[in-house]
Amino acid sequence: QVQLVESGGGTVPSGGSLKLSCVASGFFAEGNCVAWSRQVPGKEREGVAAIDTDGATTYADSVKGRFTISQDNAKNTVYLQMNSLKGEDSAVYYCAASPCGAVIAGTLNPFEYNYWGQGTQVTV
């Protein structure tokens, strides 16, 4: 059973930066596919970035050029560097993971992932 814990959220002014971390208790022998998504009350969860076990990345158009997803396999950690933050980026951010064989690699659809963290609040 994989457990994910997000951290790094907070309150920043518009134009500021935050770096979120997602630490996994363990990962999948067949490779890890991880995604960050976000949700505001009353709206559907939105995928923002994804990374596969080879390091290939995918981004939503709304964050392209501002957010960077990366991973440190030695630390079982996936990061989301968020720059040039805007008010519309305010949300609870979640990381999610699945074995890469169980999802379309790079998918931003958060509902394709099986394991979820508890979320971290970002307020801009």
Image: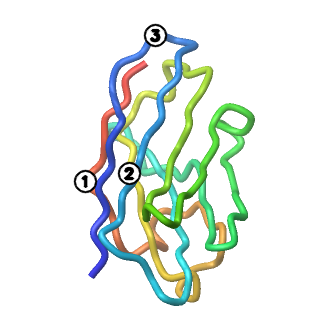
Check residue 118 in the rendering and tell me which mark sits there, or answer none: 1
Seen in the image, is 92 located left or right of residue 85? left
Question: Of the residues shown, which amino acid type is indicated by label 2?
Answer: Tyr
Graded by Cα atoms within 10 Å as few (under 14), some (14 to 19) or many (20 or more), the crowding at tag 1 reads some
Q: Report if the CB atoms under discs 2 and 1 are less than 8 Å apart.
A: yes
Instruction: Report the residue marked by disc 3.
Output: 13
Helix, strand or loop under label 3: loop
Residue displayed at 30% across by 69% down: 25
Vertical side of 13 occupied by 101: above or below: below
Question: Of the residues shown, which amino acid type is indicated by label 3?
Answer: Pro
Location of the N terminus (image quadrant)? bottom left
Residue displayed at 69% across by 72% down: 54
Seen in the image, is 13 located left or right of residue 66? left
Residue displayed at 64% across by 42% down: 68
- Which circle's residue, 3 or 2, is located before the other in the chain? 3
Q: Report if the CB atoms under discs 3 and 2 are less than 8 Å apart.
A: no
x then y, percent, for residue 106: 66, 67
x then y, percent, for residue 14: 52, 12
Separation of residues labelled 2 and 1 (CA atoms): 7 Å
Question: Of the residues shown, which amino acid type is indicated by label 1?
Answer: Gln
Separation of residues labelled 3 and 2 (CA atoms): 21 Å
Check residue 94 in the rendering and tell me which mark sits there, or answer none: 2
Picture quadrant of residue 58: bottom right
